[in-house]
Image (tube, grey):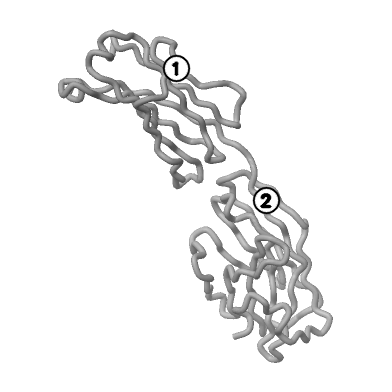
Amino acid sequence: MCFLLGFLFITCFSYTWGVRLTQNPPAVTVAPGATVILSCPLHDDESNTKHMGWYRQVEPGKMLQYVVFLNKDLSITHGDHIERDRFVPSRGDSKGSNTYFLTIRNATKEDEAKYFCAIWFVSSWGFVRGNGTWLRVTGTSLPTVWIFPPSSEELSTGIGSVCCLVKGFYPGTVEVHWSVDGDAVSESVSTTPPVLEKDNTYSVNSCLSVTAPKWKHHSFFSCTVRHESSSTIIQKSVNSKHA
């Protein structure tokens, strides 16, 4: 069916009897993890014989992506790779309401796009679309840092790891550096790539490998974390004499 094609707004025949869809505001900005509701009021129409869909365009000139379709009977059909629990279409529940909504939960940077609503009329195969609403997802989240000493079991083998767990930061770029008794070290450091968590923040795990003699000889093992959410450097240390 033509409404499933990314270029439907160009190729499908439009016959709308002066029906209008307005999408206001033209742009919405939310923080990562927020819930946003996009609205689409339908004007100058009293017919119930219609279906409603939402599409999005990541950049001007790019192909439209089918997001979700709300059928006349209020059943819902999602596009490919669209998370059903995050993208939920609906129609206003007040008497005579002709406003449609798209609720996007736990917004992520990947959701940024211009979202279009469109109505299809069963009797004529005509359609009308809205002017679109840009969704921007911006903001930062400060990381939380924990440091863990090597276990006695590890050290009994002759080598262990001091590890820093960095969680809850956004965007997903972070710097982790290590020092021993105040002297920077870069060898024997292993840091995982950022992992996207369920709350749409990121985490990394960074470990410094140390030999048992080095652990015994030195006192303070420290990791420092830099993230764009703050100009303050976060530093966590463990004292080998008291670990």
Q: Nearer the viewer, residue 204 or 126?
A: 204
Q: Earlier in the sequence, mark 1 or mark 2?
A: 2
Dot 2: element: strand
**202 left or right of 47 in image:** left
Establish if 235 lies above or below 48.
Answer: above
Q: Nearer the viewer, residue 121 or 57?
A: 57
Establish if 7 lies above or below 143.
Answer: below
In the picture as drawn, the residue positioned furthest to the bottom comes out as 123
Q: Which residue is mark 1?
A: 184
x%, y% of residue 165? Answer: 39, 30
Q: Which residue is mark 2?
A: 136
Residue 137 disc label: none
Kindly identify the amino acid type of the residue bearing the numbered disc 2: Arg
| Residue 9: quarter of image | bottom right
Question: What residue do we see at 67% from left, 66% from top?
Answer: 62
Dot 1: element: strand
| Residue 19: quarter of image | bottom right
Kindly identify the amino acid type of the residue bearing the numbered disc 1: Ala
Question: What residue do we see at 36% from left, 15% from top?
Answer: 238
Establish if 56 lies above or below 71.
Answer: above
1 vs 2, front mark: 1
Which quadrant is home to the N terminus?
A: bottom right
